[in-house]
Amino acid sequence: MISSSKPLVSAPLSTRLPRNPPPPRSSSATSTHSSQSPVSSSLSASPSPQKKRKSLPAAAPPAPGPSEPPRPVKRLRTTSAAPAAKQKPKKKPKAASSKASSRATSRNETAPPSPEPLYCSSRSRSTSLFPPTLDPLPNPVRERRWITDENGDPGDHHLSSEAVVKRLMKKYKSYFKNPNDPNDKSFEPHPTNYPVVELEYPNSFAAERFILLAPKDKDHYNPIMDLERTLYTIVECYVPKEHQATFGPIPTDTLTEAVSPPPSPSPSPSPPRSSLTSLSSSVSSAADRLPLLRAVQRAIHLQDGPLFLMAMKRVNSALQALKYPALSITDPYAPAPRNALMQTVEGWTQTGLPEPVLMRIIEENYQRTVGPNVPSLKHYEAFSSTVYGELMPSLAQEMIRITELKEDSLFLDLGSGVGNVVVQASLQTGCTSYGIELMPHPARVARDVVDQMKVRCRMWGVVVGEMELEEGNMLESKRVDELIAKADVVLVDNKVFETSLNEALRPKFLDLKEGATVISLAPFVSSINARLTKRNVDDISAIFDVKERPYHSGSVSWGNNGGTYYLHKVDREGYSRIKEKFETMHGSSVRPARSSRSRR
Ligand SMILES: C[S@@+](CC[C@H](N)C(=O)[O-])C[C@H]1O[C@@H](n2cnc3c(N)ncnc32)[C@H](O)[C@@H]1O
């Protein structure tokens, strides 16, 4: 069954808007008290090329699968900010050289995959880690226009922070209070009448509402911390230099982490909930003069609700002034001034998408779409290929860089889970991405992940590459067969795939084009360091030039240990040269090459 992401935005709204945008929809006056895929024209437009079955040797040795099936983890794995540094890996990841190549003639056998594939689907990424890579990679900046032509109105299907917390209200408690009125209930949880604030996003008409409550479990999604991080990213990366002083220095971390919420007030009879907009009480004129981010942090530190609302009101006014600059009063014919935050995005053509923006968008989208589904994603069959796990964004980022994906590349994720790497590849590079997932639940979540990523990118004012999803079996999908011949990079997160699945996948790689790369967490070749031996000369995997790279502790969701991943680059020319030499050396002892497919 093929199910593809459905478009959320029927038509670019920008075409319906006057050149000079009207004032924002909502006042953003901080506090409100609540009452076959669209994709791939580019993919499917071109006819599927004639599949040239290379006459590759048969008799492939068994595909190395994970040495032992993984034990699913029962406990929740929390990823609070400290653990990567604090938790001591049981053993250091093997210092695999990124230069180690199968072209080497040494016969060192491949180290077996790390024996710690303890998959755990549960992770809270509200405090996720982005550990530095072991071996920092060059990040070639490719000239690309990042700015979207669409406006940022998130529309009716937007999954906002407010919507996420509202559904889980019972898991939240008060964070702010009103220091001037102990009976003020307006900062307490309530099914409908909860404390909420709006934050302006960079693109015109883009804003999101955040419920001002703290999670009872500190590892769960924290909307106040999320708001802080988003605000800092907007100021750091979008606010033009000449306006930075208004906002003041960017705090290095969120304060919300450091401050524990006040105890829940007793449920004793109390006066009616007072208005959140009664700000005057705790607002001093001194606070009014603080740089904006300092004022926000001070209010969070003091857990002073009215003060926080006042600070956010100032923040939103300042952002609106940049987004909707005033028309010239002297020249009525002067062109409408442009959104200054979006002008910053214009400037990224040469420099690339700033990393904090990339990571913030990924994180925000994950928290709203995957986060609430984490408990149900744990329902997988133990010891099977469908055990769920994820690459963390830092490792996916490294893989995307090292394989040099770019705007005109095609990326496939075979076993795409919730689509986390699919959306990251398309956001990070603008490439076209395709993911296939067998299990209905992660496949359904992935559709939300893709749909909401499109909305979120518009809010941040950036374009994302095309994305296509399929729910189905990678071994049976016609779409996989069609796309594999065009793919530049194929990810197979096969750490726990059964040997039979890894083996069945290998013949598909025969159709890869020269230079394409397969990334996997368990190798598809029997020996990394000896590309051609008597034993594997007939093996389809001999077309690969394989490099291994280490990954860090904290790079995958299923365990704290580091490990190794494998980059298999299709190099048929190299294979022919080596094979020729090999045959000269071994004479008639080498069997004629045949396609592994012919054996099926
Ligand atoms: C470890 S997850 C990887 C998720 C994501 N690609 C990542 O690396 O973060 C592997 C996924 O492959 C899926 N899978 C296993 N066998 C499959 C098959 N035959 N066809 C499609 N997906 C499959 C599993 O259900 C699982 O969600």
Image (cartoon, grey):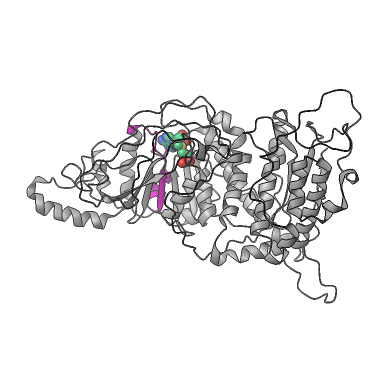
Q: How many marks?
A: 0
Outermost residue on the top side: it is 268
Residue 147, by quadrant, is bottom right
Find residue 534 and report its horizontal and vertical position in percent.
15, 44
Judging depth in this view, the residue of 509 and 213 nearest the camera is 213
Name the side, left or right, on which 98 lies relative to 597: right
Residue 489, image x, y percentages: 41, 51
Against 51, residue 596 (above or below) is: above
At 65% from the left and 37% from the top, the residue drawn is 221
Residue 122 visible: yes
The foreground one among 524 and 223 is 223
Magenta stretch: give its range. 471-499
Residue 11 visible in the shown view: no
In the figure, residue 447 lies in which quadrant?
A: top right
Q: Is residue 484 magenta?
A: yes
Quadrant placement of the C terminus = top left
Query: Splitting the image into four quadrants, where does ligand 1 fall?
Result: top left
Q: Which of 156 and 315 is in front in this view?
A: 315
**30 relative to 303, above or below:** below
Q: Percent x, y for residue 406? A: 47, 58
Which residue shows up at 53% across the image and 39% down it? 418
Reply above or below: 343 against 315.
below
Q: Where is residue 299 in the image (x, y as percent from the top left)?
A: 78, 45
Residue name at image x 33 percent, y 41 percent: 523
Asked whether 401 falls inside the magenta stretch, the response is no
554 with respect to 501 (left or right): right
**Residue at coordinates 78% horizontally, 75% vertically from top-left?**
334
Quadrant for residue 564, please give it: top left
